[in-house]
Image (spheres, rainbow, N blue to C red):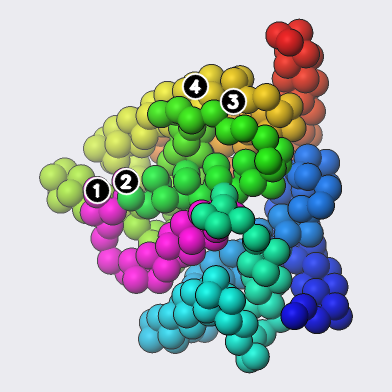
Amino acid sequence: MLNQATTEATATLAQSITRTGSKQTYYTGRLMVDRDLVSDFYRAYAYFRWIDDMIDASFLSSGERIDFIKRQRDFIDRLYDHDRPNDLTLEEEILADLIYHDKEENSGLQSFIRNMFAIIEFDTYRKDRLIRENELTWYTNCLAKSVTNGLQYFVGNGHPIPTSDTRYSAALGAHITHLLRDTIQDTQDGFINIPREYLEAHNINPNEVSTAPYRDWVRKRVEQAREYFLEGKQYLDGLGVLRTKIVGYWYCARFESVLDAIERDRYILHSNYNEQRKISTWFKIAWLGVYITLRHYARR
């Protein structure tokens, strides 16, 4: 049974966390998400924003982070077994309410939750160690499944979803870009986003972002991300729900602006990429929505 007061509290807290954490995500919820799923959309963002911040928190020891993430895994499994614990924090109640509303077996929402959790769980254990090539590939694939399945659950839920080898391409490109964007800060926090094999083969360390081998690796990652975005937008063009198409294009544009900045800097990574804060970027996003809408109806 749901407690109405708790449900209202989790909805309010989730909306606040989302608005503070990501203006684009917040307004995507207000404008594009299915009306009956808006509160759950905010809950999905807010819970994972919270546990990601906890894993990054400097005040937790390695053992405390591991204990924390084990507790989260246990209670997610229990919730999907219809066993709601009594000792949840309000932040954990956010996800408890979200999972309670998930009535479809093997839903897109469950894929979002389990894949996103797997990524953060992996971060818990990879902190302060080098990542291997196969782990980086798994990491990106996992994120792509989470984001894509989550998007198609919250926007246009119930509509047919085309199956294609390029279904996850846009999110693959986004995650590659995300890791490049956050490389400097992540490295300082103990999360290395360049493979161990590459570092060892070129005799460089994770901090040497201005060296030729590191810049060459960044260039190849940028090119790969560009290819994924191209494939992903071709997939988005085939979707029947306009809102899903617009959100997908906005998602691509958010990260393509970062790729533009990296290219302008000749593939030397920096600690800040403030493209989203520029007024010109918001105008581009607004125009993109208009353009996609006009093209969508012109092709019908």
Looking at the picture, does residue 134 appear above or below residue 102? above
Q: Is residue 255 magenta?
A: no
Q: CA distance from mark 1 to mark 4?
A: 24 Å
The residue under the point 57% across, 50% down is: 108
Mark 2 and mark 3 lie on one chain; the one further toward the N terminus is: 2
Closer to the camera: disc 2 or disc 3? 3
Picture coordinates of residue 299, whole percent (x, y): 71, 9
Q: Secondary structure at mark 2?
A: helix
- Give the side of residue 191 with respect to residue 283, left or right: left
Mark 1 and mark 4 lie on one chain; the one further toward the N terminus is: 1
Residue under label 1: 133
Looking at the picture, does residue 152 appear above or below residue 78? above
Residue under label 4: 230
Closer to the camera: disc 3 or disc 1? 3
Mark 3 and mark 1 lie on one chain; the one further toward the N terminus is: 1
The residue under the point 69% across, 77% down is: 93
Picture coordinates of residue 7, whole percent (x, y): 80, 74
Q: Secondary structure at mark 3?
A: helix
Picture coordinates of residue 188, whole percent (x, y): 42, 63
Q: Amino acid at mark 1?
A: Glu
